Image (tube, rainbow, N blue to C red):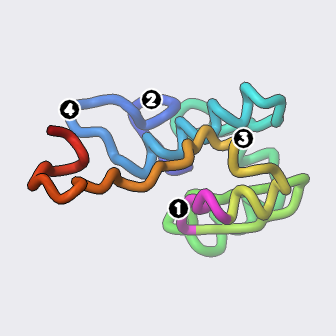
Amino acid sequence: EPAMCCSTGLCGVSVDPELLRLSTVISSLQKNGVEITRYNLTSAPMAFVNNKEVNRLITEKGVEVLPITVVDGAIVKTKAYPTNDEIISLLQVPRSYLGEQKTSAPKKNGGCNCKGGCC
């Protein structure tokens, strides 16, 4: 990840919803036994130096290439965080591992002019 004020980016007065999504997904995956390590350029710069491919990309393309997603040693995505669907595909895990809840269909109002099924 690019340099941020804290390791998750979930600090300050306005929280980026994408960072909140990613933090929630990572936490859920870890609770389900998936090993994930998240590195921030500010708090763990040596992780970027020690990974030869990541270091090469940053040297050639600059920090604009961040974030970089690596799965089993292979770079699988740059310049954006993976979507939930991409994470499921890359890690071959069920959707439930991401902490996503199935949403139920909205209740019908039954013709009594109630909104959302509540009278």
x 26%, y 30%: residue: 12
Q: Which circle's residue, 3 or 4, is located before the other in the chain?
A: 4
Q: Which residue is mark 2?
A: 6
- The percent coordinates of residue 94 (x first, y second) are 78, 50
- The percent coordinates of residue 73 (x first, y second) are 89, 55
The one of 110 and 18 positioned closer to us in this rendering: 110
3D distance between C-alphas at marks 4 and 2? 13 Å
- Name the element at disc 4: loop
- Name the element at disc 1: helix
Amino acid type for the residue under numbered disc 3: Tyr
Q: Which residue is mark 1?
A: 63
3D distance between C-alphas at marks 1 and 3? 30 Å
Amino acid type for the residue under numbered disc 4: Val
3D distance between C-alphas at marks 3 and 4? 29 Å
- The percent coordinates of residue 71 (x first, y second) are 82, 55
Residue 53 shown left or right of residue 104 in the figure: right
Q: Which circle's residue, 4 or 1, is located before the other in the chain?
A: 4
Q: Is residue 81 magenta?
A: yes
Q: Nearer the viewer, mark 1 or mark 2?
A: 2
Q: Is residue 51 magenta?
A: no
Part of the protein shown in magenta: 79-85
Q: Which residue is mark 3?
A: 97
The quarter holding residue 65 reads bottom right
The quarter holding residue 111 reads bottom left
Amino acid type for the residue under numbered disc 2: Cys
Residue 13 badge: 4
The one of 96 and 39 positioned closer to us in this rendering: 96
- Name the element at disc 2: loop
Q: Which circle's residue, 1 or 3, is located before the other in the chain?
A: 1
Q: Nearer the viewer, mark 4 or mark 1?
A: 4
